[in-house]
Amino acid sequence: MSSNSGWSTSVFGRHPWLAGFTVFYVIGWTAYGFAADTGQVYAYLAWLVGASALVIYVDGRVRFSTPVLVLLSVAGFCHMAGGNIQIDGTVLYEQSWSGYVRYDHLVHAFGLGAAGLAVWEATRRMLTAQKPKEAVVVVMLGGNAIGAAIEIGEYIATLLVPDVRVGGYTNSMQDLIANLVGSLVAAWWAVRRCRHRG
């Protein structure tokens, strides 16, 4: 963290309501997962705690904007919901609509778009990514790199936990496509912000 950081400048001090909401839903979804015996509580809890720790650490250096922090928190909520809610014996992450759109794809598009924006903000403040074209490159590379890392994690999880239910090769490719769609939307938003700032 930077030398001038403290409680008032931390994400907890700047956004206590958002930090409280995040802590509340992590505890809530974890308790629900144990009560419903979903079998994947520890995996989702570990992922959320790890991701939150990384966001808090980087925020201490770059001070993410409120919209990006809100998007990341909502993405975490959707992720935990997807792994813990079961509908007719099928986990929410495996639910699909019209035979094509899966909840998993929607969370990937939303979550990796948010991650791409977070990478852009960090890069913009630590390096130089102020212009629209630079923003597009950083958001696209950041969102898809994090998405690829998540897919590697899912693959390792299938080797270590047979009942992890993240899907096979087809699911990985669909997730990567969803990551791309999310990062494209996020890149469009980043360009608008660059132009608005002038």
Image (tube, rainbow, N blue to C red):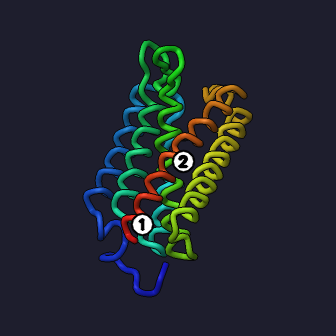
Position of residue 76 in the picture relative to residue 119 (left or right): left
- Tell me what residue is drawn at x 61 percent, y 30 percent: 166
Give the crowd class for mark 2: few <14, some 14-19, many >=20 residues within 10 Å.
many
Q: Which residue is mark 1?
A: 64
In front here: 134 or 172? 134
Q: Residue at x 70, y 43 (%)?
A: 152
Q: Quadrant of the C terminus?
A: bottom left
CA gap, disc 2 and disc 1:
18 Å
Please say if 156 is above or below 118.
above
Q: Position of residue 99 (x, y in %)?
A: 52, 14
Image quadrant assignment for residue 194: bottom left
Of labels 2 and 1, earlier in sequence is 1
Q: Secondary structure at mark 1?
A: loop
Can residue 164 be seen here? no
Per the image, the residue denoted by label 2 is 183
Residue 54's spot in the image, x, y percent? 52, 61
- Residue 71 seen from this side: yes
The reply, left or right, for residue 134 in relation to residue 62 is right
